[in-house]
Image: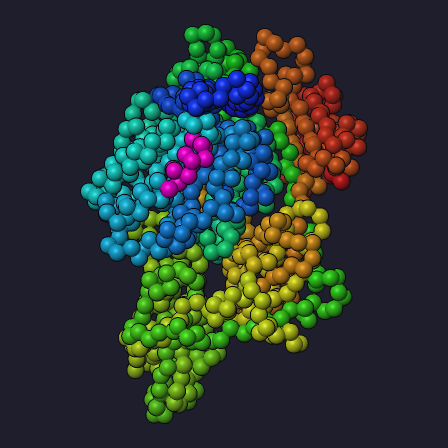
């Protein structure tokens, strides 16, 4: 990487020096020669020199990327690479440099991103590459940081992105069938892929041109679902491969989860573990394109998290078993702004429990423990790239992999894949402690630089500080009076409404121009009908494909429901004699993004819809009636979120807890520079805009189910998406990210469209702070910090062989102000609830206080030399909880 960067800088200096030289050459000669011929000769010479310069610069900067059985090969050298996904539209350009720098500091070599077709071509042939979709800028920023890029063009991307990344207009191309051997689809896929490749080439962003892109992906996980597409799947994949290759990027292509990926496409693995994966040819390296660092959140679901010990275990196992390229999906997950979240029911937050959280703050100890892991793996690089591992058993569930080169380098990985018992193994005559479900990395085949279950990085708390929404200008007026509102009409109000017999599928009707589709019916009830029986109600039965339905009878909300694929509602209703209106509002919450034929799953009220008399007996089919349809809302058409309107009403009292209202207020930005979120508690469901920018769908009343949560998830044993859950029984998402760069100090506008009814005056702001509390437990059996790692022969300082507890306040202006807990011995509990065990050195607290208070960071050797011997024959730990201020 350093080399790559240095060569690039050298290339630039070289070209500017040459430029000076040419300029002088031209001046001198001009005074002596004047005729045309001479000028032409001179021109030719100039051209040749320029060409030469270009060749020199190109040769100096272009990298030759190939691959072989062991690894990607860059400029003739095999590389061990660590990669992480950051999806550029899930953060802002203002956040990108910091996210990339934090990735680099965390030990990444490569940033992996999908390319989001729906964002880049929202309408056919109308391209957009600005703002959060400025792909070129993103790639260049990664390049400036000295990192590589893996560009996953897809253009199907899945990614919990609306419609899997496909623009919805694609669905309306005549004769189209997605992701199969279908001419109209292939034509569009080729057009977009070519557009992206051409753009990258034009900006010289492929490594073959001196840029950072070392790898591109075509399609995405098609092998998971291709059987549903029959024989056409085979020819489609062959076509995809040759189409991609014909674009001549000069760097390799990969296909993920595609066992039959044709040569020379590299087939790569996705999953929670990929150590058992082998590519489909011995000439291809073992690569892992998606190691899920956590999992995505859905509205109505609890929050998944993946313990870092298990994530590190999966990574170490992969490199132990011959892998040389691994990518965290996600390294920074970010936010599904606007209506970009996939479906059904993907939340607005795409935090993913990634090493960098949604707001761009480090998630500790996840980020730190992985950084240490990356350092340990890089210490093994020479041995790793030289050879295949020799794998031997050290006992049941115990395995050693040794990479030994002819020149004498040796690296070893020792694994305990058992889920219950720790083990002590003997390897090369030395004894090693291996906790269950862990890997130790020995870059010299002797000393442990890292163990996946022994964390040397402190847990850092993060906290939201609430500030109530301060009215603009600091006025002391009641908040409610600062809000204005516009009522969205119930039912049909727009002139483009239309009549159709029967029930229409929603995506085909709205083309996803809006989340909202009104289905409206007027019906006459004669006085003698059973639906009007005294004391009993009629029942409206509705079936919908999703995701939310509100039923209004004669203008009043009578019932609602939501669901992922199928909603079935029985709503008791009161009808009147004469004219009645049934207005059904169907709302999508992200279009499906995964599975065979996900594009045809559909949404909306497709029926049956019936009216039953409560006493049983009669039932009328409403589905086949003549319905009136309205795509979208009146307020959407008038642009209430973005343009001024004289219709806003500021009269008190503010109507609250009523469905279908637009709200607006102005506010001051929370002070400071910390990331900002709006807490929507008190509201129901809707979409929100800050200064005209959509911050996404909010839905704090969507509550996670009660089952499956655990406070302390055992990292040992195979991870699954629902293994470790928190937040059961609570709202899935109350906090919604507002990027700082979208805010001005004062005079900011917040607009909401509230569907179900809520009280916007309860909205508050939070700023997210990091790290006032630090916790860490380091045992005597922990390896010393990886930063101090030196192989046996070079050890001069005894302390380097000792474990060390290191604390550092994350903010540079902070110092450690108090030690809330310290015990060397057998401390118990976890952060926030540490207690001393039966064995405890009486010097613990005073020693830690002395070493740490008043400094930003401190290092304490975890040994009896420092703390004395509180109990013989026991492996002791030092547990500390400290505060920074
Ligand atoms: C994979 C897919 C990704 C993402 C992930 C789950 O199957 O390739 O795009 O959807 O699952 O987060």
Q: In this view, does 851 lie above or below 564?
A: above
Specify the quadrant of the image occupied by residue 368.
top right
Whether residue 204 is in magenta: the answer is yes
Q: Is residue 283 above or below residue 532?
A: above
Q: How many labels does the image show?
A: 0
Query: Which quarter of the rendered picture does the C terminus lie within?
Result: top right
Q: Position of residue 434 (x, y in %)?
A: 52, 24
Q: In this view, does 19 lie to the left or right of 161?
A: right
Specify the quadrant of the image occupied by residue 561.
bottom left
Q: In this view, does 520 lie to the left or right of 422?
A: left
Q: In the image, which residues are magenta?
A: 195-206
State the residue at coordinates (36%, 92%): 527
Report the front residue among 800 and 25: 25
Residue at the limit of the structure toward the left, as seen here: 231
Q: In this view, does 111 lie above or below 409?
A: below
State the residue at coordinates (67%, 24%): 804
Q: Position of residue 714 (x, y in %)?
A: 52, 38
| Magenta stretch: dominant secondary structure | helix
Residue 533 visible, this angle: no
Q: Where is residue 825 in the image (x, y as percent from the top left)?
A: 69, 28
Residue at the limit of the structure toward the front, as seen here: 35
State the residue at coordinates (32%, 55%): 171
Report the front residue among 570 and 477: 477
Specify the quadrant of the image occupied by residue 48.
top left
Residue at the limit of the structure toward the bottom, as seen here: 527
Whether residue 525 is in magenta: the answer is no
Residue 177 visible, this angle: yes
């Amino acid at each position: 990487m350093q080399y790559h960067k240095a060569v690039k800088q050298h290339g630039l200096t070289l070209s500017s020096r040459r430029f000076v030289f040419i300029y002088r050459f031209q001046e001198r000669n001009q005074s002596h020669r004047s005729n045309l011929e001479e000028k032409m000769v001179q021109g030719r010479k100039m051209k040749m020199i320029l060409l030469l310069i270009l060749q020199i610069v190109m040769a100096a900067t272009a990298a030759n990327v190939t691959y072989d059985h062991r690894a990607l090969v860059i400029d003739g050298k095999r590389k061990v690479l660590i990669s992480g996904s950051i999806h550029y539209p899930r953060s802002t350009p203002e956040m990108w440099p910091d996210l990339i720098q934090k990735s680099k500091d965390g030990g990444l070599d490569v940033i992996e991103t999908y390319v989001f077709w729906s964002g880049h071509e929202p309408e056919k042939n109308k391209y957009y590459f600005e703002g959060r979709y400025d792909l070129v800028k993103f790639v260049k920023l990664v390049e400036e940081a000295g990192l590589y890029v893996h560009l996953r063009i897809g253009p199907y991307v899945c990614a919990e992105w609306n419609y899997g990344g496909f623009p919805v207009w694609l669905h309306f191309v005549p004769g189209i069938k997605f992701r199969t051997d279908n001419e109209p689809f292939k034509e569009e896929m080729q057009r977009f892929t070519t557009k992206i490749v051409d753009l990258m080439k034009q900006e010289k962003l492929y490594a073959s041109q001196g840029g950072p892109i070392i790898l591109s992906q075509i399609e995405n996980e098609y092998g998971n679902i291709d059987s549903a597409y029959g024989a056409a799947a085979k020819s489609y994949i062959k076509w995809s491969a040759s189409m991609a290759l014909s674009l001549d990027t000069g760097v390799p292509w990969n296909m993920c989860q595609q066992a039959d990926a044709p040569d020379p496409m590299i087939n790569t693995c996705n999953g929670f573990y990929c150590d058992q994966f082998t590519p489909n040819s011995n000439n291809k390296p073992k690569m892992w394109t998606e190691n899920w660092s956590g999992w995505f959140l859905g509205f109505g679901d609890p929050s998944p998290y993946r313990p870092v010990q298990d994530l590190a275990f999966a990574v170490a196992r992969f490199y132990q078993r011959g892998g040389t390229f691994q990518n965290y999906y996600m390294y920074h997950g970010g936010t599904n702004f606007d209506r970009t979240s996939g479906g059904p029911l993907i939340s607005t937050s795409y935090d993913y429990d990634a090493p960098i959280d949604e707001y761009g703050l480090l998630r500790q100890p996840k980020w730190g423990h992985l950084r240490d892991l990356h350092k340990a793996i890089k210490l093994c690089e020479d041995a790793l790239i030289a050879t295949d591992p020799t794998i031997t058993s050290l006992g049941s569930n115990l395995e050693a992999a040794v990479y030994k080169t002819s020149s004498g380098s040796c690296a070893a990985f020792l694994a305990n894949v058992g889920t219950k018992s720790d083990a002590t193994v003997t390897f090369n005559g030395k004894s090693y402690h291996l906790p269950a479900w862990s890997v130790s990395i020995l870059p010299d085949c002797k000393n442990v630089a890292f163990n996946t279950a022994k964390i040397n990085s402190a847990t850092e708390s993060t906290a939201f500080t609430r500030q109530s929404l301060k009215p603009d200008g600091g006025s002391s007026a009641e908040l409610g009076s600062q809000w204005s509102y516009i009522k969205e009409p119930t039912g049909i109000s727009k002139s483009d409404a239309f009549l159709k017999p029967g029930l229409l599928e929603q995506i085909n009707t709205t083309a996803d121009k809006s989340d909202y589709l009104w289905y409206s019916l007027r019906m006459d009830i004669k006085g003698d009908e059973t639906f009007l029986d005294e004391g009993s109600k009629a029942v409206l039965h509705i079936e919908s494909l999703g995701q939310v339905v509100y039923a209004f009878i004669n203008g009043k909300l009578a019932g609602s429901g939501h669901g992922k694929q199928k909603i079935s509602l029985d709503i008791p209703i009161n009808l009147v004699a004469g004219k009645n209106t049934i207005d059904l509002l169907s709302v999508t919450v992200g279009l499906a993004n995964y599975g065979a034929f996900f594009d045809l799953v559909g949404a909306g009220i497709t029926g049956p819809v019936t009216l039953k008399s409560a006493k049983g007996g009669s039932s009328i089919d409403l589905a086949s009636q003549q319905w009136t349809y309205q795509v979208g809302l009146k307020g959407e058409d008038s642009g209430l979120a973005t343009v001024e309107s004289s219709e806003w009403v500021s009269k008190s009292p503010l109507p609250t807890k009523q469905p279908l209202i637009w709200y607006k207020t102005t506010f001051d930005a929370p002070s400071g520079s910390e990331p900002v979120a709006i807490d929507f508690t008190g509201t129901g469901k809707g979409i929100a805009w800050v200064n005209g920018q959509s911050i996404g769908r909010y839905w704090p009343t969507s509550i996670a189910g009660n089952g499956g949560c655990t406070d302390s998830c055992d990292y040992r044993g195979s991870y699954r998406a629902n293994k470790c859950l928190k937040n059961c029984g609570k709202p899935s998402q109350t906090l919604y990210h507002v990027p700082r760069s979208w805010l001005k100090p004062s005079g900011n506008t917040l607009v909401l469209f509230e569907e179900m009814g809520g009280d916007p005056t309860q909205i508050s702001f939070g700023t997210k702070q990091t790290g006032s509390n630090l916790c860490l437990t380091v045992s005597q059996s922990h390896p010393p910090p990886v930063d101090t790692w030196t192989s046996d022969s070079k050890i001069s300082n005894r302390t380097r062989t000792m474990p060390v507890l290191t604390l550092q306040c994350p903010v540079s202006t902070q110092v450690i102000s108090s030690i809330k807990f310290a015990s060397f011995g057998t401390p118990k509990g976890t952060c926030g609830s540490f207690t001393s065990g039966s064995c405890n050195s009486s010097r613990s607290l005073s020693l830690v206080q002395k070493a740490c208070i008043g400094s930003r960071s401190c290092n304490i050797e975890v040994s009896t030399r420092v703390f004395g011997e509180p109990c013989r024959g026991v492996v002791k730990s030092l547990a500390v909880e400290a505060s920074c201020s």
